[in-house]
Image (cartoon, helix red, strand yellow):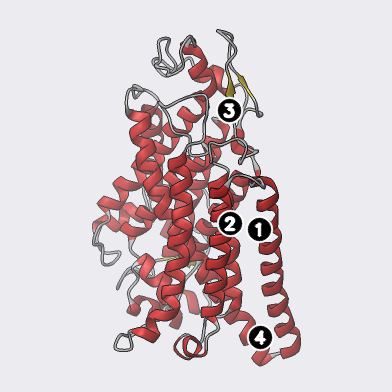
């Protein structure tokens, strides 16, 4: 277990007998991921009942005279309804700015001998203090155009993080498939083949059930044509991807491809489709829409329960996010997709797989400690890892606020831009997945191993 001295600096941690025998590269990623998850919990707390009253005490955060687009509405209504969302924007602004600064600082680090590597792997107390300072300071940023500008940045960042999630999900599916195929070859082949087939079939059955539910709840017999197009087109696109993954020529060039990966991508596409439709501003086609009813000059009333981030779509999004972040932190992948994602060198992967570090492979009677396994070369790109967490912070911001678009018509929280960002990301994800299948077959002069 880690104790306080292990959080102060890498040098202290190396001398600390309480630290586990682990690779420095893995421990560091886990700590950064834990800080991101801690920030996510704080952002969720900002949306909890009673916190809004405390937030109003922050000078200038929820002042009278805030702009509103609704005639005859008092300014405090805007604040009462959206103070939680604004707080989430500030918390995620602090996290994302912190990760972005670290990403810039860590550009082009080759090994742990670089002085900046010590900042990446240590000085946790000072880095955490900087994170807290930036986040607290964000609450004093005047509203003005900040919220809308950060909404635009958040939408773009969340879009790219969705694509990163796809890469991680495909890698997870490949690893899962390889592990079970290996067990088939070395153990009871019938049992593992049945398990692999059962999981694949269950994924497709669940996807079909979800598609039927989409048609029931998000379409009407004589309307909601855009939702009908989204559902039908994405399911057809998923069928094409599944067929391509088992083509004979694709199997020759990509023996690791299969229906298990395609079934997981199909499930993820159904989630993105669902997420897009839950942001549609047409209440007839979106039963989960949060709207505001205005009656004369009376205070508006929410037609759905407050704190809509707790709906099923947001919860599923958070679960996928947490799993992907944890997987990216502990995964030492030999697959090309993840190596290119983290910009790890082939030599680093070979060293990691060979277990050439004597401190990890040999039995040690001395103190258990974190081993520096990056003296020759880093195991992953520090800069890109922080940039990925920067995008993850923006994704969390958009997920918790249901892609709320500020400074627009406050009678409807969901907006079409969020719908198109999400549905476009589903098309890009499927296109990228199909390209990873056919690229080795089309570009024979390139090495995709």
Residue 368 in view, yes or no: no
Report the front residue among 351 and 425: 425
Q: Secondary structure at mark 4?
A: helix
The answer to whether residue 102 is above or below residue 66 is: below
Q: Earlier in the sequence, mark 4 or mark 1?
A: 4
Marks 2 & 3, CB-CB < 8 Å contact: no
Report the front residue among 414 and 348: 414
Residue 267 in view, yes or no: yes
Tell me residue 46's x, y (percent): 54, 30
Q: Which mark is residue 183?
A: 4
Q: Which residue is mark 1?
A: 211
Instruction: Calculate the distance from the C-alpha at mark 2 to the C-alpha at mark 4.
Output: 37 Å
Instruction: Calculate the distance from the C-alpha at mark 2 to the C-alpha at mark 3.
Output: 24 Å
Tell me residue 401's x, y (percent): 51, 36
Q: Quadrant of residue 68?
A: top left
Q: Which residue is mark 3?
A: 291
**Residue farthest along the front direction in this orientation:** 222
Marks 1 & 2, CB-CB < 8 Å contact: yes
Q: Is residue 211 left or right of residue 225?
A: right
Instruction: Calculate the distance from the C-alpha at mark 1 to the C-alpha at mark 2.
Output: 7 Å
Mark 3, other Cα within 10 Å: few <14 / some 14–19 / many ≥20: some
Tell me residue 388's x, y (percent): 39, 55
Q: Secondary structure at mark 3?
A: loop
Q: Earlier in the sequence, mark 4 or mark 3?
A: 4
């Amino acid at each position: 277990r880690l104790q306080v001295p292990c959080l102060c600096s890498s040098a202290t941690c190396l001398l600390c007998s309480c630290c586990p025998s682990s690779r420095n590269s893995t421990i560091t990623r886990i700590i950064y991921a834990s800080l991101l998850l801690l920030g996510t919990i704080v952002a969720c707390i900002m949306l909890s009942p009673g916190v809004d009253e405390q937030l109003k005490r922050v000078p200038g955060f929820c002042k009278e005279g805030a702009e509103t687009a609704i005639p005859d509405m008092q300014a405090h209504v805007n604040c009462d309804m959206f103070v939680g969302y604004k707080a989430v924007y500030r918390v995620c602004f602090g996290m994302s700015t912190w990760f972005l600064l670290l990403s810039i600082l860590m550009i082009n680090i080759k090994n742990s001998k670089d002085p900046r590597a010590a900042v990446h792997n240590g000085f946790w107390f000072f880095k955490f203090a900087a994170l807290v300072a930036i986040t607290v300071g964000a609450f004093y940023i005047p509203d003005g155009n900040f919220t809308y500008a950060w909404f635009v940045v958040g939408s773009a960042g969340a879009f790219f993080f969705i694509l990163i999630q796809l890469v991680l999900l495909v890698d997870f599916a490949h690893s899962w498939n390889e592990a079970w195929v290996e067990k088939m070859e070395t153990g009871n082949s019938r049992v593992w083949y049945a398990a692999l087939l059962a999981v694949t079939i269950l994924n497709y059955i669940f996807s079909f059930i979800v598609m039927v539910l989409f048609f029931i709840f998000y379409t009407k017999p004589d309307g909601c044509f855009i939702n009908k197009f989204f559902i039908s087109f994405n399911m057809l696109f998923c069928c094409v991807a599944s067929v391509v993954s088992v083509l004979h020529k694709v199997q020759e060039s990509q023996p690791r491809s299969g229906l298990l990966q395609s079934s997981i991508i199909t499930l993820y596409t159904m989630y993105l489709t669902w997420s897009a439709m839950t942001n549609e501003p047409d209440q007839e086609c979106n039963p989960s829409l949060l709207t505001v009813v205005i009656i004369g000059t009376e205070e508006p009333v929410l037609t759905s329960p407050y704190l809509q981030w707790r709906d099923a779509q947001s919860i599923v999004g958070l679960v996928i996010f947490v799993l992907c972040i944890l997987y990216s932190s502990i995964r030492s992948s030999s697959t090309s997709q993840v190596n290119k994602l983290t910009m790890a060198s082939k030599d680093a992967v070979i060293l990691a797989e060979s277990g050439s570090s004597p401190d990890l492979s040999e039995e040690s009677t001395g103190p258990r400690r974190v081993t520096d396994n990056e003296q020759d070369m880093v195991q992953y790109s520090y800069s890109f890892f922080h940039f990925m967490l920067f995008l993850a912070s923006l994704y969390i911001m958009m997920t918790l606020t249901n892609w709320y678009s500020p400074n627009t018509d406050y009678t409807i929280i969901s907006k079409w831009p969020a719908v198109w960002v999400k549905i476009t990301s589903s098309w890009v994800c499927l296109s990228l997945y199909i390209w990873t299948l056919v690229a080795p077959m089309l570009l024979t002069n390139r090495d995709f191993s």
